[in-house]
Image (cartoon, rainbow, N blue to C red):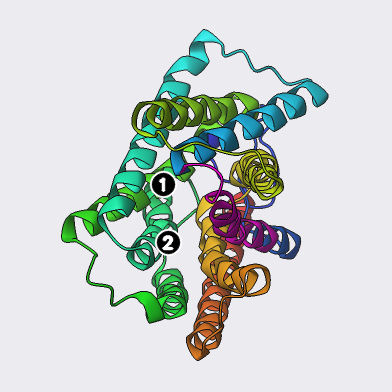
Amino acid sequence: MSVERSDPPTSAATPDGLTVRRPLTPGATGFALFLAALWGGNPVAIKAGLDDAPPLRLAGYRFIAGGIVTIAWALATKQSLMPRRRDLPALAGLAVLFAAQIALMNIGQDQTTASHASVIGQTFPLWTGVVAHFAVPGDRLTPARVLGTLVAYAGVVLVVARDFGNPEATLLGDALMVGSAALLGSRLVYTSVASQHVEMPKLLMTQVVVGVVVFLGLGATIEDDPWRLTGPLALSIFYQGFVIAGFGFIANMWMLKHYMPSGVTALSLTTPVWGVVIAHFVLGDALGPSLFAGVGLVVAGMSYAHLATVRQQRRALREAREDAST
């Protein structure tokens, strides 16, 4: 029996050993929110490191550090990093999606404002829900889930609304950011599906290799600014690399492997909120009333979407039991 042809709602694995993705439990929800908080600190770490290193090379160092964590984790858990021939198509697809998403994101950010990029880029959970509806058994996109996600997204817009009127944004830049967000949502679903058949370290190392080649390659080609190894830069690379590109990538991929991808990524809508709060305490950025209104919308929307998902899964469980009894 294949995991892609069945969807037992209460089982963690099929008889052939493949993992079945489940709806989020309370514990998994808390862990996903913790990961979102970690990701919220990433822009703060990037900003702290940019004083001593140019942006592309800083991103390359991040992926090198993430690769060290991935290799150490694979060795500690005795998982292989060497792809088999049958793994190559899935890894090649992931590499193309990852490289294209990074390219659109970086070009788009250069053609629009930071606030536009933040708001548009954060639409990826919406794209994840749409793609998962067709690609992941049981991960259905219901009207209630759409409504809850849109309410939460309105909260994200409010969080960054104070900087949204900058005239430097362009239609091209915004369009590229939409493409990047759509590719990110698609890549997360692709990863969730691929992780059922390809070991996680192989998927993670594919992203690491692409990240190092793209960012360090471009940095060596177009960046000539010097970099200085300072304490703040070391802390920045540690957070971006070991915490985010290392632990964060591993934990997020584990969540995508075991839980419904739309539920996992929907909680990422809280990331900008965490980012604003962390920037306030670390960098001294001011907190405005829009933050608190945005937090309220995010919490309300995510709660409504989560309850709708729980009701959907319970209904699927009842239907499965009824089918089994007839």
Separation (CA) of disc 2 from disc 1? 10 Å
Q: Residue at x 58, y 38 (%)?
A: 62
Q: Residues within 10 Å of mark 1 (few under 14, many from 20)?
A: many
**With 258 as the anchor, is 153 left or right in this view?**
left
Three-letter amino acid code at the position of disc 1: Leu
Q: Is residue 114 left or right of residue 139?
A: left
Magenta segment boundaries in residue numbering = 33-54
Residue 143 in percent (x, y) is at 39, 71
Residue 22: x and y, percent? 63, 51
Asked if the residue at tag 1 contacts the one at tag 2, i.e. Cβ–Cβ closer than 8 Å, the answer is no
Q: Is residue 41 above or below residue 237?
A: below
First in sequence: mark 2 or mark 1?
A: 2
Residue 241 x/y as whole percent: 64, 40
The label on residue 184 is 1
Which amino acid is tagged 2?
A: Gln
The question of residue 314 being in magenta is answered with: no
Q: Could you say where residue 121 lies in the image, as x and y percent from the top left?
A: 39, 58
Towards the viewer: 108 or 16: 108
Q: Identify whether 35 is placed above or below 217.
A: below
Above or below: residue 243 compared with residue 149: above
The N terminus lies in which quarter of the figure? top right
Residue that carries the numbered disc 2 in the rendered image:
122
Q: Residues within 10 Å of mark 2 (few under 14, many from 20)?
A: many
Residue 47: in magenta span: yes
Secondary structure found at label 1 = helix
Question: In percent of the image, x 73 and y 65: which residue is there?
Answer: 26
- On the question of residue 173 being in view, the answer is yes
Closer to us: 237 or 30: 237
Judged by its main secondary structure, the magenta piece is helix
Within the image, what quadrant is residue 118 found in? bottom left
Give the number of the disc on residue 282: none
Name the residue: 52% across, 24% down.
209
